[in-house]
Amino acid sequence: MRLGLVQRGTYKTTEFDDLTGYQLEVNGFSYNFGEIIAEARQRVRFLWRIECPPDLISKRLHFSEEKFFNRMLKSSQYGIFNPHTGAHVCLGLVGQAETHNLVIHEIAHEIHYRQGGYSGADETVQEAVAILAEEEFGQREFDYNPHFTSQQLLHLLNELPGFGQLTFLERWNNLSRIATTQQLSGLINQLLDDNEGGRLERWLGQHCANPDQKQHILNELALTTQSYALYNRGLVFKRIYDLNANPGQPLTGALRQLRELDRRFPEQMLTNLLEQAFARFTY
């Protein structure tokens, strides 16, 4: 366990076998490491139904006061996970109660890494998995990416009965196996369609010549709707239903054009963009 401090103007990293008896004050906030570590162990047990691995606490969980942390990262952040060294948590930005949430966020990265999903996932998915664990205990608002996008996509998932009503472990297992933001968007689309009676699935089954064509359209749809709320995703679904022949390239072309229009005219209503994108591809 490592603690980064600034002592008499000197940056110093100290290794501890056990921080449980250590207390520290940073920027007016007091931290009792015995309580922080005990809470971390309890939360791991509660969420994943396992005992917190001893080496995670002793070798892979690190704390640094704000000055040291910002020097290390060149930016103001609450925490960071490094596959080589483990979870790093900043002290001095929030109090101990909020720090419990920061710790479980970084430990979630560690568990995701140990289960084999972290390294192959993009940043948006990595953060969505960690935010999933953190939000079992409290919600933090993010105004920077990838965290902002991760949280928005996670909240869309939680709105859908096929995900939001599952246990934490079921949600964790579903989400931690995903690798890309596009796949995460595709899962949202699938669950949304399930919730609306499976009309999109039936339409694709009727109009797609083979499974590869169907998957290609689903991939394009997921990419197009990555930043869409559930209602706007539904509008795109409904526009697709208007096509009454083999979709093929015309449909994927319309979805690509919709992405381009959305990029160029972000203030335009989606219904107007849909009309422009799909006008020349209507059968």
Image (tube, rainbow, N blue to C red):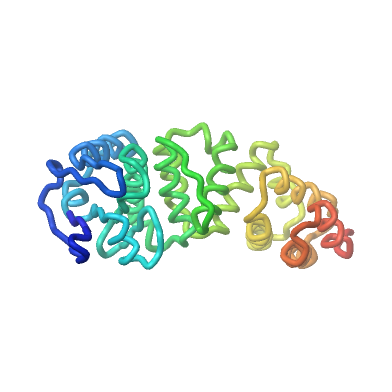
Question: At 38% across and 56% down in the image, what residue appears?
Answer: 117
Q: From the viewer's perspective, is 219 left or right of 181?
A: right
Question: At 26% across and 65% down in the image, what residue appears?
Answer: 84
Image-quadrant location for residue 44: top left
Question: At 20% across and 66% down in the image, what residue appears?
Answer: 10
Q: Nearer the viewer, residue 60 or 34?
A: 34
Q: Nearer the viewer, residue 98 or 67?
A: 67
Q: Nearer the viewer, residue 5 or 283?
A: 5
Q: From the viewer's perspective, is 75 left or right of 200?
A: left
Whole-percent x, y for residue 88 in the image: 29, 56
Whole-percent x, y for residue 191 in the image: 60, 42
In this picture, is 117 found above or below 29? Answer: below
Quadrant holding the N terminus: bottom left
Image-quadrant location for residue 132: top left
Whole-percent x, y for residue 248 in the image: 76, 64
Question: At 72% across and 52% down in the image, what residue appears?
Answer: 204
Image-quadrant location for residue 167: top left
Whole-percent x, y for residue 14 in the image: 14, 59
Q: From the viewer's perspective, is 130 left or right of 246?
A: left
Q: From the viewer's perspective, is 214 left or right of 13?
A: right
In this picture, is 31 found above or below 73? Answer: above
